[in-house]
Image (cartoon, rainbow, N blue to C red):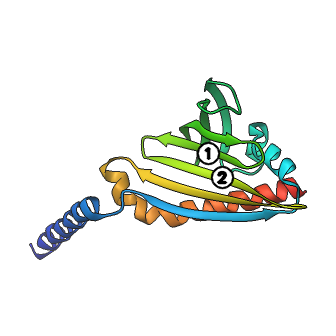
């Protein structure tokens, strides 16, 4: 009987925690990442925009398929497929802003979250600094509860992708 009471009390606390987190918690998480690539901004931007090469530096990237619009133009949409522990995860990417050698912004949509990314390319002469500003908005009750626990992993993975990109371009 004592064990059952402990389980119910624990579940009650978890439920209260979940409700409070959902009501008062963050519905948006944002962070900024950067890396400096030892190549010209023209080369870095061109490589970054080459979706055919994305599997070399984006962990789990499997494929992409154009849905609408023209590549390299605002409004273009792509189905992006990723492998996450043997399971295919599909995102819809929509280009929201593009300025050659300066900026690429896009939104990635999935049932668990909507992620907005603004990637800028800063010309440092022979080098280029990539600055990625990311805003993640979890979708649904479950993801709003889980996102605070997942955000550090997402941030780490995005930074690792930028470092792999740097190695690919400099290699």
Q: Out of 11 and 40, give the one closest to the viewer.
A: 40
- What number is the disc on residue 148? none
Quick one: SS at disc 1? Answer: strand
Label 1 belongs to which residue? 105
Give the spatial CA distance, label 2 vs label 1: 6 Å
Label 2 or label 1, whichever comes before in sequence order: 1
**Whole-percent x, y for residue 167 in the image:** 83, 59
State the SS at label 2: strand
Q: Is residue 40 left or right of residue 57?
A: right
The answer to the question of whether label 2 and label 1 lie on touching residues, with beta carbons closer than 8 A, is yes
**Which one is in front, 17 or 31?**
31
Does 62 appear above or below 24? above
122 on left or right of 14: right
Residue sitting at x 41%, y 64%:
148
Q: Residues within 10 Å of mark 1 (few under 14, many from 20)?
A: some
Q: Residue at x 76, y 42 (%)?
A: 100
Q: Residues within 10 Å of mark 2 (few under 14, many from 20)?
A: many
In the rendered view of the protein, which quadrant contains the N terminus? bottom left
Q: Answer with the quarter of the image where residue 37 lies.
A: bottom right
Where's the C terminus, which quadrant? bottom right
In percent of width and height, residue 130 lies at 73, 59
Residue 79 x, y percent position in the rendering:
59, 32
Pinpoint residue 151: horizontal percent, then vertical percent: 49, 63
Q: Residue furthest left?
A: 1
**Which mark identifies residue 119?**
2
Does residue 17 sit above or below 107 in this rendering? below
Q: Is residue 103 above or below residue 23?
A: above
Q: Quadrant of residue 165?
A: bottom right
Is residue 87 visible in the rendered image? The answer is no
Number of labels in the image equals 2
Please tell me whether residue 110 is drawn above or below residue 78 in the rendered image. Answer: below
């Amino acid at each position: 009987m004592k064990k059952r009471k402990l389980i119910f009390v624990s579940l009650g606390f978890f439920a209260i925690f979940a409700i409070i987190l959902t009501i008062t918690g963050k519905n948006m998480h944002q962070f900024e990442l950067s890396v400096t690539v030892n190549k010209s901004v023209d080369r870095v931007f061109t490589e970054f925009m080459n979706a055919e090469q994305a599997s070399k530096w984006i962990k789990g990237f499997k494929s992409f398929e154009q849905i609408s619009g023209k590549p390299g133009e605002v409004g273009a949409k792509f189905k992006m497929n990723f492998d996450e522990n043997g399971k295919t995860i599909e995102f819809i990417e929509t280009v929201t802003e593009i300025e050659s050698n300066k900026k690429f912004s896009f939104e990635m949509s999935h049932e668990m979250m909507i992620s907005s990314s603004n990637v800028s390319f800063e010309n440092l002469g022979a080098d280029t600094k990539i600055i990625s500003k990311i805003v993640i908005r979890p979708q649904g009750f479950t993801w709003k509860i889980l996102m605070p626990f997942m955000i550090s992993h997402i941030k780490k993975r995005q930074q690792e992708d930028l470092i792999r990109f740097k190695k690919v371009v400099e290699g």
